[in-house]
Amino acid sequence: ETGVTQSPTHLIKTRGQQVTLRCSSQSGHNTVSWYQQALGQGPQFIFQYYREEENGRGNFPPRFSGLQFPNYSSELNVNALELDDSALYLCASSLDTANTGELFFGEGSRLTVL
Amino acid sequence: AQSVTQLDSQVPVFEEAPVELRCNYSSSVSVYLFWYVQYPNQGLQLLLKYLSGSTLVKGINGFEAEFNKSQTSFHLRKPSVHISDTAEYFCAVSRSGGYNKLIFGAGTRLAVHP
């Protein structure tokens, strides 16, 4: 059973650029959530995908968007990068949308915006 | 809306001593409660969760937590810590019956000294 994997692990962008982060969910998991963790803070919920549809979103602007593919892997896209977007981006997968289960987190993609 | 306050940003403790990491939450609806641990350069791992039933919850690595509804608290305890417990600990809450949107606290850095 493979765990949640994310790529790339580190990347550096400049203001105004666009970035795509990728996540492969744990085997058998059909729900993927994305979180942003700024330095010294707890993770903040960006959005969740279930069966290729967004079914929950946190307080993030529309320039944060995502996709989920038929194999349940997912992408997070951020347009018009700002300095404050520098953070660790965590992907988490689970078996269903009900929050009684455990979220399995990847090790994250660390984005630095210069 | 829900919120989580972790009362200590850092907790230093000697090896084999007991430790308590404090967490208070605010919510107008029923919630589920979680503790996650984050080791350096890794993703988050679930320690334990409270969904319903017994207010004393036991988790992995010898940790336990007690749900106190009247005090809106969910403090994490371990009777004897090891050097390997050094990590960042996050308390999180989600609305019961809702989708997997976790609201995290800012984290508590547990530093175990020999």
Image: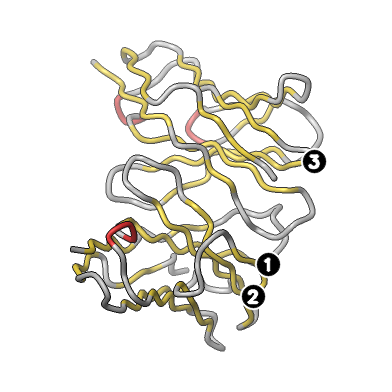
The CA span between labels 1 and 3 is 20 Å
Q: Nearer the viewer, mark 1 or mark 3?
A: 3
State the SS at label 1: loop
The CA span between labels 2 and 1 is 8 Å
Subunit of mark 1? A
Front position in the image: B51 or A55? A55
Rate crowding at label 2 as few (under 14), some (14 to 19) or many (20 or more) other CA atoms within 10 Å.
many
Subunit of mark 2? A
Q: Identify the residue at horizontal 26%, vertical 77% (top origin).
A: A17
Front position in the image: A103 or A50? A50
Q: Which residue is mark 1?
A: A96
Q: Which residue is mark 2?
A: A50
Disc on the earlier residue, 2 or 1: 2
Q: Amino acid at mark 2?
A: Tyr
Q: Amino acid at mark 3?
A: Ser
State the image coordinates of residue B18 (x, y, percent, origin top left). 45, 12
Q: Give the label on residue A28, or none.
A: none
Q: Identify the residue at horizontal 22%, vertical 65% (top origin).
A: A10
Q: Nearer the viewer, mark 3 or mark 2?
A: 3
Quarter containing the C terminus of chain A: bottom left
Q: Give the label on residue B30, or none.
A: 3
State the SS at label 3: loop
